Amino acid sequence: MDSKILTTLEYPKIIDKLTKHASTSLGKSIAEALQPETKLESVKALLQVTDEAYAADRLKGSAPFGGIVDIRPSLLRARIGGTLNPGELLDIASTARGGRRVKRHIESIHDEHPLPMLSTTASGLAEHKPLEDAILDCIDENGEVLDHASPELASIRRELRSGEGRIREKLENMIRSSSVQKMLQDTLITLRNDRYVIPVKQEYRGSFGGIVHDQSGSGATLFIEPEAIVAMNNKLRETRAAETREIEKILQKLTAQAADHGEELLIDLELLAELDFAFAKARMAHEMKATQPRMNDRGFLKLKRGRHPLIDKDKVVPLDVELGNNYTAIIVTGPNTGGKTVSLKTVGLLSLMAMSGLFVPAEDGSQLCVFDAIYADIGDEQSIEQSLSTFSSHLTNIIRILGSMTAKSLVLLDELGAGTDPAEGSALAIAILEHIHARGSRIIATTHYSELKAYAYNRKSVINASMEFDIATLSPTYRLLVGVPGRSNAFAIAERLGLQRSIIDHARGEVSEEDLRVENMIASLEENRISAESERQSAEALRKQMEAQRAKHEEERLRFEEQKEKLLLKAQEEAREAVAKAKREAEVIIADLRKLAMEEGASVKEHKLIEAKRKLDEASPQVQTKKVKSAGKQGKIEPGDEVMVYSLNQKGSVLEVHGSDATVQLGILKMKVALDDMELLKPKAADAAKAVQPKQSGASLNRTRDDNVKMELDLRGESLEEAIMEVDRFLDESFLSGFGQVYIIHGKGTGILRTGIQQYLRKHTHVKSFRNGNYGEGGIGVTVAELK
């Protein structure tokens, strides 16, 4: 691809943005050398890699490229026998560790979300853990060789520390001496030329022996090595030389290990560079809010709301354009500053980006073509050095384009034919367009010449386009309108700016009738387009509203189904628990009954059976149901009838009926209740009493319709006064429930409770007769009362 055309379309600026997103110098190098591809399969592969990196970056963030550096110079020196310094070895270990982290990162994402191309690249990264460990075991993060790098170094370092300690101790004893202190400039120990010295005043040089190694800038202080430690300093220097030789051996050994891994490390660097480059493309796509375009090689492109990537995304006007299907050439007409040049550059630059494997700032569904070349003549090409006019410079570029283009090329021409006589310029522009069109190249050209509007209108596969202009505000909207030729708008602008009407009318008279018809036709087309666009936007808004409503309803339906399922599961679980509980309690009750049967033989006392039955009833799960009035379906309510009072959820007996109300006996209470608030349950109590036949067998029980009222009363353990009150309440309830006989359990004991209760029964209005319990009914521990 011609570098001049790449610069014209601002491709290098995209490369600069891409380079800044690379994490390593390796990735930056690939980004800086990026060029558009001209083979469809190669472009698709590049875009797939970008798509995988984009997905990986979205799922778990960018790969960890920290610590990876370009170690190729160090590896080259290691291979030719040089010794690497600790910093270079640390870079090798850091790069090996970074490569391992990147590999693990991509593999972990690949397990959840397939990344075939990235995982294949990452799988080629070799493991260098032994080399990494060997280096880090010998060198710390500051680049210092550690004592335990070898036994010899550890021994030398111990000897060094011991020798330094002896020298310091000797010197400290010396400077603490009062005779020496007066000769010192300062009581401190320092180093000069790797030898320990002390600062001595110049005037005491004659009386202070030793070797002078340095002096201060003023000459007042001499740094002297006392004779007493010269031999010790010599020994220390020899030990330091031994330390240096041992460190050199350790570094040579580590360098040899690095050289053994050299080939693999060089391959790793290439793979890491490719991976870093892929994630750089992904990060730039995220920043631009770009999408992956569909690619073809048949000369078709369709941009949906494409944006120029170098213009602020909050200010740029999206571009919708289609080329290469129904028409292969677009002629854009209209005044300057309307955005024609930006539209040309947007199409060209987005095509170059896609051909380079980069996502483009456009909506999903955009399509771009892999051209064999993109040619552009855009902007003012006047050259002072070559003494060429604007027209000559443009024409030189166009001649070069005409000689190089093919049927698979994209040609972008800005202000075609400008810079010369309008009549000749328009004729030349038409001839150039006709030639390019005949070659089969795709063309987008901008021009001022109105003659080209007619050319585009009459030529098959060529279509007019224009940049929208708002007459009301006298400003362009920068929207490309395909299918509508541009208007000059000169008269409208002049009128809006206040030019006299007579002058404008005179100017219109100078325009040919044919030109006026063309302008009027364009105006009519634009009005129709604006109306259609408004209706389309309204329809689109309505469609989005309906889709949002449908999505909301679907969400509510799914939420309802989910809630219903949860409630059903909860109800089933509660029912299972209730049944299980009832079964457990029933088993306990049955076990008690069996125990009673075993204890008392074949005969089980009636009150015990009743108690066991009560426990079974209580163990059954109770289902709460709402009573529903059956108004209009009940018979006539008369005194003596048993009714259910809805508002109190209680049963009672009707005493009197007067109009729409009735007096009802509810236990020991009498209440006036509306007839609409009650339901007839059974006929008069007197008639019902006749239907009740007292049972003679103690083992057979007669239960009423009301399971809440029991047929026996257990008074054991209570005082006589409490028992009498309980018996009175119990007899009232039993009488209202229509029982024929009831059982009062008082036990045998001293007989006081039995005697008191039976005396009370003799006087009670509801008691017809009473007797002691028979065999099997509890004997004298139970009184059986027959009710009236």
Image (spheres, rainbow, N blue to C red):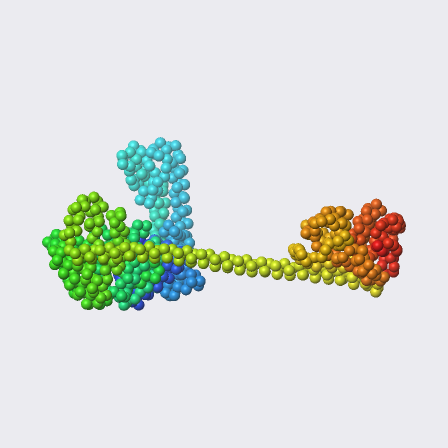
Q: Position of residue 728 (x, y in %)?
A: 82, 49
Q: Is residue 255 visible?
A: no
Quadrant of residue 98 in the image? bottom left
Query: Does residue 474 lie above or below 632 as drawn?
Result: above
Q: Position of residue 231 (x, y in %)?
A: 35, 45
Q: Relative to 452, is 697 on the left or the right?
A: right
Identity of the residue drawn at 56% across and 60% down:
565
Nearer to the camera, 207 or 649 = 649
Identity of the residue drawn at 34% across and 56% down:
535
Nearer to the camera, 34 or 259 = 34
Q: Quadrant of the N terminus?
A: bottom left
Q: Relative to 648, is 145 on the left or the right?
A: left
Nearer to the camera, 592 or 550 = 550
Quadrant of residue 567 in the image? bottom right
Q: Is residue 422 visible?
A: yes
Identity of the residue drawn at 38% across and 51% down:
141
Q: Position of residue 144 (x, y in %)?
A: 37, 51
The residue furthest left is: 387
The residue furthest front is: 659
Q: Relative to 507, is 623 on the left or the right?
A: right
Q: How many numbered discs sit on the rendered protein?
A: 0
Nearer to the camera, 515 or 579 = 515
Identity of the residue drawn at 72% across and 47% down:
672
Q: Quadrant of the C terminus?
A: bottom right
Q: Position of residue 757 (x, y in %)?
A: 86, 50
Quadrant of residue 178 in the image? top left
